[in-house]
Image (cartoon, rainbow, N blue to C red):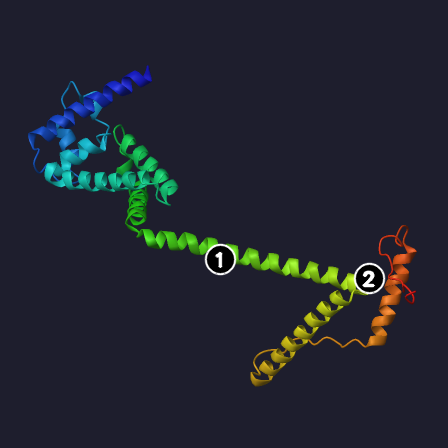
Amino acid sequence: GHIDDDAVNRGVIFVSHWRAFLASPAFGYGLGSFPLINNVVMTPETYSALWSIRAAHNVYIQWLEEAGVVGAAPMFVCIGACLWTAVKSARQRSPERLFLDGLIAADIVVLLHGLTDYSLQVPSIAATWAFLLGLQVALVRRPASDRAAARGGAISRFGRRTMTRLRKIGLQRTMEALAIRAQVDKDSAARATVCGVQRDRLTVQSMNVCHCARNPQVEPPVRTRKTSSAQVRRRREVSTSQSDSLPGAPGLFPQARDPGPDV
């Protein structure tokens, strides 16, 4: 069928141009000389396979044929060194192992495809593979301390932000519980804790106001209105009456009662 015919034609192309390489193995025939060489090696027997091709469909044979051993060997050594260093670094369980494995897989695909086609002679594909080779060399040559610092810095920043948010949420919930306990149970310790935190907030606000006065470019913080003791009592009575109006509420927040004089 068609596949068998194509395989036969590829075999004819490979044999004809391999013989051309062996005729001038050291320096080849020059870059870009494939069309001329193809016309020279064409015979009546190989005409049906060679007359319409513009590449050898094998990048290794064509590189050797055009550049010879002197020109193709450095290219092979360079590609082999890039691939070997990437494989060696990936085997050492480096932090970039996942990326290196992907780049090595891409190298293998390109190299195997070059055995039966001329994809690397397409400028866009050659430029993309050159970029991938440069990327894997950069990952291998990157110092281990920089890689660890980059990973540790990202993790530590995420951890610091998470812990800060958790502290804020925990402090807010604790203050809400203490405020409820101070208002409902009339707990003196909870009331003292809440008042102490409020005093600290007022101190911080006053310090911010002084800082803004010294630096006009900084906007002053929003000051909260001071609540009088009478307003606090009224709010407490309103909250108590609202809680008593709910079903099952009297048992939810038991009111502190005066035990009376000691007997």
Q: Which sits in the foreground, 113 or 2?
A: 113
- The residue positioned 68% from the left and 61% from the top of the image is 172
* Left/right of residue 262 with respect to residue 16 in the rendered view: right
Cα distance between the residues tagged 1 and 2: 42 Å
Q: Say few, some or many: other residues with alpha carbon within 10 Å of mark 2 (under 14 / 14 to 19 / 20 or more).
A: some
- Expressed as whole percent of the image width and height from the top left, the position of residue 211 reads 58, 81
- The residue positioned 24% from the left and 18% from the top of the image is 8
Q: Identify the residue at the far top of this view.
A: 1
Q: Amino acid at mark 1?
A: Arg
- The residue positioned 52% from the left and 58% from the top of the image is 160
* Left/right of residue 200 with respect to residue 99 in the rendered view: right
Query: Where does label 1 land, which residue?
Result: 157
Q: Identify the residue at the far bottom of this view.
A: 214
Is disc 2 placed on a helix, strand or loop?
loop
Query: Where does label 2 land, which residue?
Result: 185
37 above or below 134?
above
Figure quadrant of residue 83: top left
- The residue positioned 32% from the left and 48% from the top of the image is 139
Residue 29 seen by the camera = no
Q: Identify the residue at the far front of this view.
A: 263
- Expressed as whole percent of the image width and height from the top left, the position of residue 255 reads 87, 60
- Expressed as whole percent of the image width and height from the top left, the position of residue 248 reads 89, 50
Figure quadrant of residue 68: top left
Q: Which mark is residue 75?
A: none
Q: Amino acid at mark 2?
A: Asp
